[in-house]
Image (cartoon, rainbow, N blue to C red):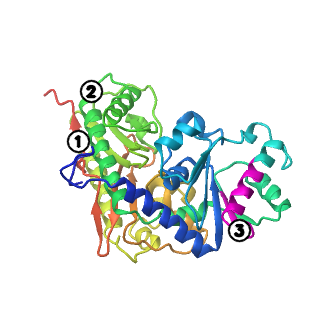
Amino acid sequence: MAFGKYAVDFEQRVDYPRLRKERVERVKAQMEAEGIGAIITWDPDNIRYIASYYVTTPMRASEMQAVFIARNGEPHLIGGGTPSETARRMPWLAGVQPSYGMPRLSARDSGDRLIEAWVNGIAKLMADYGVEKETLAIDGTTLQGLFFEAFGRKGIKTVHGRPVMDYARMIKTVDEIELIKIACANSEKAHAAVADAIRPGVRECDLVAAGIKALYEEGADHTEDLVCMSGENTNPYGWTFTDRMIRPGDLVYVDVDGASYQGYKTCIYRTFCCGKATQEQHELFVEAKEMLLKGLSVVKDGATDHDVLAQWPDSPSYWGYETWGDVNPYACGHGIGLTLHDRPMIFYTHRAVGIPPHTLKAGMVMAFETYTGKKGGRHGVRIEDMVLVTETGYELLSLFPQELIECWIPY
């Protein structure tokens, strides 16, 4: 991150017209590759990728807003608050029109009037672009099966659209990478705020509040609740937070996860100690860090998820368990961008059920995370870093110190 985050006249920073243009180009290229004539998505992150429109948290479950794009056209937003005002503020859109309603709250079958309204409106857009005889990809709706039936009655072939968007978004553009770096910098401030707040009597939920406050001070447009586990809650591994009070000698691990800056997310774990860490705690931390670095050692363009897994423990018994299902998240990796979990996913269970290796490519942004803790023990350590895959290795994006940081040292 060479520059600041705000717009200035004296240097080139994030180029938003280029960001929008290149994201749309990648969607069109993926549609072309898969023989798709158009896509309609209700998924908030894919709406943002295609149209740069932010769906607010209360509206995400309603499925009242969607974006349509034909392979030979530009984005159309359906349901943008006050459409005329949205169109004025977002002149790059080909059109903004009122929503057809919320069939999620009314539909029992594909003959629902609201589903018919959506289908008729989308079919008209397809005809306007001359792709009415081509395949329509449908993404991000709980009513996908009903839409498949309704479009089928109109003679329009439909397919599941999520893979189209997943593959379009896997390789990040230069502006996406810059925004992700800014999001990581915001997360570093959140981790620092947590470290400053750790002391006896502070609760896990208080630490979450301190981290989220720091994120919103830096312009976060959304964040998931931070993971914050302390003391006995660190072993076995868990990923939530409670009102447990921090006590002297506790380990505390915190994940600044889903911290969104202009849509782009982070997922970064760090482990702290309330007071001086014991030898056992230091050893657990070193073990987790060495595991993480061993996985990262093979990351580069052309490596596979199986190459990474081969660097990690080869049996769940390493953590004291019998099945991979018990420890699936204990050592894993995932893409990250507008969603917290992009392709590719690196999980033991994916390999166990025979999913073919997935190749890492330069331009992917990935998060890798590891955990150590003896079964039945009191302490657990979780660490995670975000990296940009390069031709020859990786660039580390998460720069908060990867050490067991001792907080509240009164002696």
Residue 180 on image: x %, y %:
35, 53
Whether residue 411 is situated above or below residue 146 in the rendered picture = above
On the image, numbered disc 3 is attached to which residue? 135
Q: Residues within 10 Å of mark 2 (few under 14, many from 20)?
A: many
- Hey, which quadrant is residue 79 in on the image? top right
Residue 67 on image: x %, y %:
60, 51
Whole-number angstrom distance, CA of label 2 to CA of label 1: 13 Å
The answer to whether any part of residue 170 appears in the image is: yes
Residue toward you, 133 or 41: 133
Whether residue 219 is situated above or below residue 68 in the rendered picture = above
Q: Which amino acid does label 2 sit on?
A: Arg
Whole-number angstrom distance, CA of label 2 to CA of label 3: 58 Å
Dot 1 or dot 3: first in sequence order is 3
On the image, numbered disc 2 is attached to which residue? 199
Dot 2 or dot 3: first in sequence order is 3
Secondary-structure class at tag 3: strand
Whole-number angstrom distance, CA of label 1 to CA of label 3: 54 Å
Secondary-structure class at tag 2: loop
Mark number displayed over residue 405:
1
Dot 2 or dot 1: first in sequence order is 2
Residue 125 falls inside the magenta stretch: yes
Q: What stretch is highlighted in magenta?
A: 118-138
- Are the residues at dot 1 and dot 3 in contact (C-beta closer than 8 Å)? no
Residue at 36% of width from left, 40% of height from top?
254
Q: What residue type is labelled 3?
A: Thr
Residue lying at the far bottom in this picture: please name it. 302
